[in-house]
């Protein structure tokens, strides 16, 4: 069994910062990276950034320069540092744990999400 738990969501004012955390527990062998997604109210879930434990990171254009993703394989944890938050960043943020499956392809596990609200 794999559990994925996000934390750190809150309400902040525009220009503020938050740091989200995501911890994977259970059977973590094969875990090779983690991805953050977000789902704004009434919209589809979209990717925000990902990190592999080999050190690769990727950011979507709408967060590049404001958000920083990092990961710790030993503790199966990833963080998303979010700076200069804007109202359009309001969303439920989800963490997805990315595994190499025994079948050879990828396997994904999702957390339940953490709410980020940016409002004055």
Image: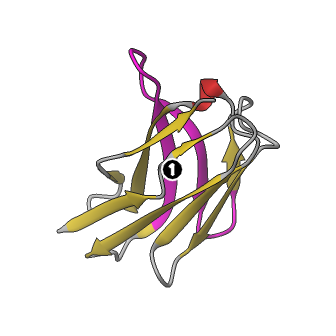
Residue segment shown in magenta = 32-56
Q: Residue at x 82, y 43 (%)?
A: 65
Residue extending farthest to the front is: 120
Residue extending farthest to the right is: 65
The image shows residue 48 at horizontal and vertical percentages of 59, 38
The image shows residue 120 at horizontal and vertical percentages of 63, 29
Decide whether residue 117 is among the magenta residues.
no
Taking 74 as reference, is 6 left or right?
left
Residue extending farthest to the left is: 1
Decide whether residue 54 is among the magenta residues.
yes
Query: Up-down: is 21 above or below 94?
Result: below
Q: Residue at x 69, y 30 (%)?
A: 86
Task: Kindly indicate the quadrant of the structure image that contains residue 16.
Answer: top right
Residue 101 in view of the camera: no
Q: Residue at x 71, y 29 (%)?
A: 62
Task: Give the residue at mark 1.
Answer: 35
* Of the pair 101 and 18, the residue shown nearer to us: 18
* Of the pair 48 and 114, the residue shown nearer to us: 114
User: Helix or strand or loop: what does disc 1 sit on?
Assistant: strand
Q: Quadrant of the N terminus?
A: bottom left
Circle 1 Cα neighbour tier, 10 Å, few/some/many (<14 / 14–19 / ≥20): many
Query: Up-down: is 96 above or below 48?
Result: below
């Amino acid at each position: 069994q794999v559990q994925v738990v996000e934390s750190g969501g809150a309400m902040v004012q525009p220009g503020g910062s938050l740091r989200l955390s995501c911890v994977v527990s259970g059977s973590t062998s094969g875990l090779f990276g983690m991805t953050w997604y977000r789902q704004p109210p009434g919209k589809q879930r979209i990717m925000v950034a990902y990190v592999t434990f080999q050190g690769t990171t990727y950011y979507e254009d709408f967060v590049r320069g404001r958000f920083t993703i990092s990961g710790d394989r030993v503790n199966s944890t990833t963080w998303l540092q979010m700076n200069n938050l804007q109202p359009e960043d309001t969303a439920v943020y989800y963490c997805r744990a990315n595994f190499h499956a025994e079948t050879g392809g990828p396997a994904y596990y999702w957390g339940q999400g953490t709410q980020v609200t940016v409002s004055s």
